[in-house]
Amino acid sequence: MDNIAGPPVEGDNFFGREADINALRALLEHHDLLLLGPRRIGKTSIARALMRVMREAGWRVVEINVATCDDERAFVEKLETALRQETASLGDKLWDSVGASLNAIRARIQAIRIPVPGAGSLGVELRAAPTKDWTTVASELVALIAGLDQRWLIYVDELPIMLLTRIIRSDPTTGVERVRRFLDWFRNDVRGLPGAGRVRWLVSGSIGLDTLVQQHAMADTINTLRQVTLPPFSEPEVIAMLDRLGARYGLALAAADAAKLLAGIQWLQPYYVQLAFSELRGLLAGQPGAAPGTLIDATIEQVARSAADNDFHHWEQRLAVQLAPATAGHARALLSQAAMTREGARVELLLATLAERLPNATAEEVQRLFIDLRDILRRDGYWGANEGAEGRRYRFLLEPLRRWWLRRNTP
């Protein structure tokens, strides 16, 4: 196994997660899935591992990343292109039965009208007979593959980015309505197509679709998606991972040293284990002859500083992407309180922090906002709750992120 901290991993570099893959495979028999979690926890890696397993089981699988799709038509175009490539591999006989239909659908895609912000009912029209509703063409496309004697898995990555930044933020007049229509199409129209049970969807993104729909009062639109998350590795799994890395790079860690490294990371997602191992290798290369155990503290500090700086900026920036400016500021203030110590902050202190920022709010309003933000930060992997003799505390799950946050937000 190579020491890779960054891009998605596949093949021999994909480690563990067998139980998670088996669970996802079983769920796909009857459900569409929404894979939740922050960036760098392996969503793309496990999605591609799942795709490989499903393909081996006889399913047809396609992947589309829609982060750069500017509107609904671009989404349908990307989906059509991916499905065209996959159906072309079905063989000449089947291609003959669907090729003409796909060509007709592609022509209709070019005629889709999308609202232009500030232009009322005007839209983009490239042909003389425009299709009034993109959902009609999209449904034709899905119905076409659903009618084949095949099972399909369609992996849609970064859908929340498209819906939030490409539609809602760029179209303040009708953007929310358009996103609701998109998700209603996904929930109702697609599921109502003949043979729809032969097509399963896996949706993920670096910001949470669950948070997006809750912020815009449309949580009902994703209630047919089975929400799943990727838990951190157990300590035995991480030890096994470190053993494989150690064998690959001639860097075996003693049990006490490995335990110290794990304690320094705390939240044992594989990316951060790989990152810490990479930093330790770098420090050892600069200090030949040093014992690995003497550099564990420096390793964790290095992860918290330059090594993962861009990644940790994303943790801060995604709050501004998901939340209104004032709400994002409140979330950052709560996290800054929790970052003061490894043990986190007590609920009373966090409530007082919000109350100070909202002098005109009632105690009930402050409590409601805290509960909303508490749940968002917990779902998105920022913090977790600890029960102790002094009551409940909320602390950062990832120790290097806590150190980074404290350094960045302390005067």
Image: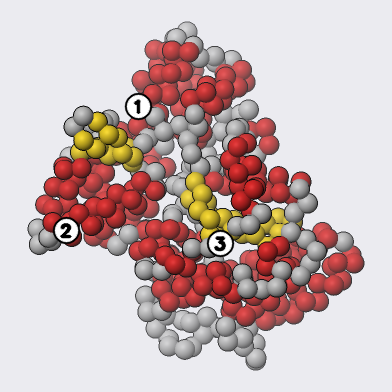
- Residue drawn at (65%, 47%) of the image: 25
In-image side of 285 versus 265 (left or right): right
Tell me which numbered mark, 3 or 1, is placed earlier along the sequence.
Answer: 3
CB contact under 8 Å: marks 2 and 3:
no
Quarter holding the C terminus is: top left
Marks 2/3: CA–CA distance: 40 Å
- Residue drawn at (13%, 53%) of the image: 355
CB contact under 8 Å: marks 3 and 1:
no
The location of residue 277, given as percent across then percent down, is 49, 25
Q: Identify the residue position indicated by label 3 in the image.
A: 66
Camera-nearest residue between 104 and 47: 47
Q: Identify the residue position indicated by label 2 in the image.
A: 364
Label 2 Cα crowd, 10 Å radius (few <14 / some 14-19 / many 20+): few
Q: Amino acid at mark 3?
A: Val
- Is label 1 in a helix, a strand or a loop? helix
Q: Amino acid at mark 2?
A: Glu
The location of residue 394, given as percent across then percent down, is 27, 39
In-image side of 312 versus 273 (left or right): left
Label 3 Cα crowd, 10 Å radius (few <14 / some 14-19 / many 20+): many
Label 1 Cα crowd, 10 Å radius (few <14 / some 14-19 / many 20+): some
Q: Identify the residue position indicated by label 1 in the image.
A: 301
For the view shown, which residue lies furthest in the left direction? 359
Q: Is residue 133 above or below residue 56?
A: below
- Residue drawn at (71%, 69%) of the image: 195
Location of residue 186 (image quadrant):
bottom right
